Amino acid sequence: MSDRRATDGRATDGRTTDGRTKRVRLSDVARRANVSTSTASRALNGIGELSEDTRAAVKRAAKELNFRPSPVARSLRTRRSHTAGLVVPNVAHAFYAAVTTGAQAELEEHGYRLILVDSGEDPKTVRRAVRTLLDHEVDGLLVSTAPFGADEFNALLDATPCVFIDELAPGAGVGNVALENGPGVEMLVDHIVEHEHSRIAFLGGPSDRTSGLERLEGYRTAMARHGLRIPAELVRECEWTIASGFEEAAALLALEPRPTALVTASGELALGALAAARRERIAIPNDLALACFDDLYFAPLLEPSLTAIAYDARSIGSAGARLLMAAAEQQRATWSEVRIDVGLVCRRSCGCAYDPSADLAEAIG
């Protein structure tokens, strides 16, 4: 049997003499196409004055050898890694999973890779996550948690472009992407008022976070517009958890007189409120109307089905990716902000007539 080894120590099947697969280099493509390495590079990058036959031969050789350009070599040549980093506080949460999906799809369509880091919300772990991505020389960052202020973020980022998504740090980065938080809660209050409620309570998120603050402002704005008083006991600040929603809703339901309607700033808080109402045998919507921000995917299947503010979380990630790529390609990026539209989905929990037979079809279709 003949010895099937090339003179450079590789077997002719693309493996090294010890059986390991070796990465195909540009020089291998050039050798197969019988051109110089520089000619092969120009042909693959679509630059330079080359004949169509030469370009075709190089591309054919690259395809035959399954050649993939080295990202390291490209970054050395262009001084860009074509890599973006994404920092999220909880990758297992459906919202951040959708944001990640949207960002990755947009980035990959434009030749970027995404590095994802789950940072939690502790300032120390967020700093560590940002530094890790900067150490990998990403072209820019998408950050969706902001447990410290703009001055520290700017010092940490130095000149690296950063877009904040959902959770904002005013004065930091090159842009923001967030939901229409305030207008969304205004829609909920307006709709509850249409059902002739006036003693409307609110379960909000942390007031030191973007969505918590903006959704509280939306509640206050709508209540004022309708000329409705807001007794202090009707507004409760929560963590973004079902347990916190349960605890604070239980306190609201113990009031005399009890609120006749409840708006919550998130789906988790609504689930906690549902549990508290069931424990006290308070019927929704007959005894308490309920509506929330966040249209949970199983909201149509709850009993009663949940009236909610809906939005496309993937579009948050894709919009952030577009802002980041634009900033990375500019010498001086212009700061910009994108707000993602939201919409009201009316179901039975607020008192609307709703056909229960539509629940399953909506959830699976």
Image (cartoon, rainbow, N blue to C red):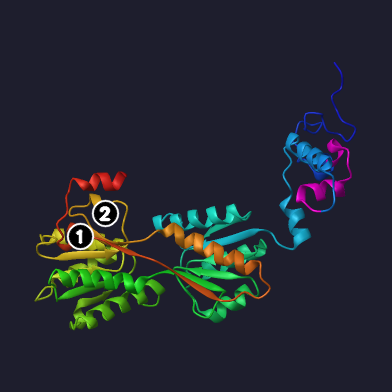
Local crowd at mark 1 within 10 Å, few (<14), some, or many (≥20)?
A: many
Is 154 placed left or right of 119 in the picture? Answer: right
Residue situated in front as seen by the camera: 71 or 247: 71
Identified at 18% across, 74% down, the residue is: 200
Query: Above or below — where is 107 with respect to 289?
Result: above
- As drawn, which residue projects farthest toward the top? 1
Is 297 placed left or right of 112 in the picture? Answer: left
The magenta stretch is: 30-47
Is 336 placed left or right of 282 in the picture? Answer: right
Q: Position of residue 307 (x, y in %)?
A: 23, 60
Q: Position of residue 159 (x, y in %)?
A: 65, 74
State the residue position of label 2.
299
Would you say residue 309 sits in the magenta stretch? Answer: no
SS class, disc 1 = helix
Residue 238 visible: no
Predominant secondary structure, magenta span: helix
Identified at 67% across, 63% down, the residue is: 137
Q: Quadrant of residue 231?
A: bottom left
SS class, disc 2 = helix
Q: Position of residue 330 (x, y in %)?
A: 66, 70
Q: Position of residue 197 (x, y in %)?
A: 13, 72
Query: Above or below — where is 4 with respect to 127?
Result: above
Q: Residue type at mark 2?
A: Ala
Q: Quadrant of residue 265?
A: bottom left
Quarter holding the N terminus is: top right
| Residue 274: mark in rendering | 1
Q: Residue type at mark 1?
A: Leu
Is 180 placed left or right of 318 in the picture? Answer: left
Cα–Cα gap, marks 2 and 1? 12 Å
Local crowd at mark 2 within 10 Å, few (<14), some, or many (≥20)?
A: many
